[in-house]
Amino acid sequence: MIKSIRLQRFKSFNDLEFRITGSKGSPQNIVLVYGENGAGKTNLTESFAFLRDSVLTLSPSDTINPLADEAKGICYLDPCERKETSMPELCSEVRMIGSDDGPRITVTMSVDGHDARYELSMDARGFVVYEALNYMINDRS
């Protein structure tokens, strides 16, 4: 479950961290987002669509086959949903106006009780300059 998302230079957000955790730091089952018109509610929800669409821009041979192999025939990405676009095109839709740099998104989540973190950073042209997924598989203590 998602614990937080940080958006930098993403649409109307220069630097926003949106936490989706309760008082003890555990992820919430239900999250409601409300606010005045123009506050950024849609931009926040579009960040999740952007992450989904960024995966769908990859070549099916790069994503679908390895995922299907690892999941023993179960594939979570539908090749019919592939976007006919590129990362630079996607980035141009979400990059903050007036920014000299591209957007950066950091998602912190809880997976099987362990924290995981995904980071995606693009340059001003919309090319990926940094991508990382940090997740502890086993605790050796």
Image (cartoon, grey):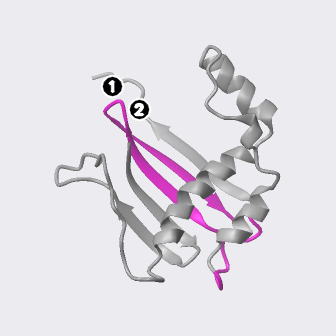
Name the kind of residue labelled 2 in the image: Met
Q: Per the image, is 33 magenta? A: no
Which residue corresponds to the image point at 35% horizontal and 30% vertical from the top-left?
A: 112
Question: Does 24 sit left or right of 116 as displayed?
Answer: left
| Residue placed under numbered mark 2 in the picture | 136
Quarter of the image with the N terminus in it: top left
Residue count near mark 2 (Cα–Cα under 10 Å), binned few <14, some 14–19, many ≥20: few
Provide the residue span drawn in magenta. 97-126
Quarter of the image with the C terminus in it: top left
Name the kind of residue labelled 1 in the image: Asp
Residue count near mark 1 (Cα–Cα under 10 Å), binned few <14, some 14–19, many ≥20: few
| Residue placed under numbered mark 1 in the picture | 139
Which residue corresponds to the image point at 43% horizontal and 71% vertical from the top-left?
A: 16
Q: How far across and how far down the image is residue 53, in percent?
A: 67, 51
Q: CA distance from mark 1 to mark 2?
A: 7 Å
Question: Does 50 sit left or right of 118 as displayed?
Answer: right
- Does 40 appear above or below 140? below
Does dot 1 land on a helix, a strand or a loop?
A: loop
Q: Are marks 1 and 2 in contact (CB under 8 Å)?
A: yes
Q: Residue furthest left?
A: 23
Does dot 2 land on a helix, a strand or a loop?
A: loop
Q: Per the image, is 100 magenta? A: yes
Q: Nearer the viewer, residue 124 or 1?
A: 1
